[in-house]
Image (spheres, grey):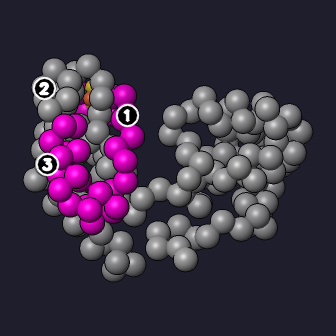
Amino acid sequence: MNHSRYPEWRAEAAEALIAPIVAAEPGPVLLCLQAVQAHFGYVPGDAVGMIAKACNVSRADAHGVFTFYADLRDTPPPAVPVRLCAAEACQAVGGRELKTEWATACGDDAVLAALTGVDEPIFCLGNCALGPAALVDGELMGCADVARLKAAVTQAQTAGEAL
Ligand code: FES
């Protein structure tokens, strides 16, 4: 059962996504990986092999591209992913403390933890002047704190349920 906003993985749907990209671009491994992730929320292992074949590169080459980019994931994302900036400017204005406080909040609330998943650190969101910065369900947040993160998670969850 799939509770996310993304459709269940289907090889035929992935092939339909990949075919026009391969036809239009030379060596579009990254574009294909991005297209699959944008559609399904992640890139299953089967998709890497499929993309390698479609792009006429080895599976190792396609896997190398996949593993190079930290934003590409091989497991379905949580319902409302929360990522905290772990780069220096945000650390200087409380990013480490926020990470600890967020981990505590998730530790105290199993529903929140399941909803937001593991914080996968991200390194600079280009919002250094308003740190600590975070991404909540892909939306940028400046001056993040636990209360604002929780409110944004609730808002994203409500918006997702309305779809
Ligand atoms: S260091 Fe966090 S947004 Fe740049």
* Callout 3 amino acid: Val
What residue is shown at x 18% (from left), y 46% (from top)?
Answer: 104
What residue is shown at x 20% (from left), y 60% (from top)?
Answer: 109
Percent from the top left, x then y, of residue 53? 87, 45
Instruction: Determine whether the residue tagged by mark 2 lies in a helix, strand or loop.
Output: loop
Of the numbered discs 2 and 1, the one sitting upstream in the chain is 2
Question: To which residue does mark 2 refer?
Answer: 93
Main SS of the magenta segment? helix
Of the numbered discs 2 and 3, the one sitting upstream in the chain is 2
What residue is shown at x 27% (from left), y 66% (from top)?
Answer: 111
Contact flag, marks 2 and 3 (Cβ < 8 Å): no
> In this view of the protein, can residue 139 be seen by the observer?
no
Q: CA distance from mark 2 to mark 1?
A: 16 Å
Asked if the beta carbon under badge 2 is closer than 8 A to the nearest atom of ligand 1, the reply is no
Q: Which mark is residue 146?
A: 3
* Callout 2 amino acid: Val
State which region is magenta.
Answer: 99-128
Ligand 1 is located in which of the four quadrants? top left
Question: To which residue does mark 1 refer?
Answer: 122
Percent from the top left, x then y, of residue 20? 78, 55
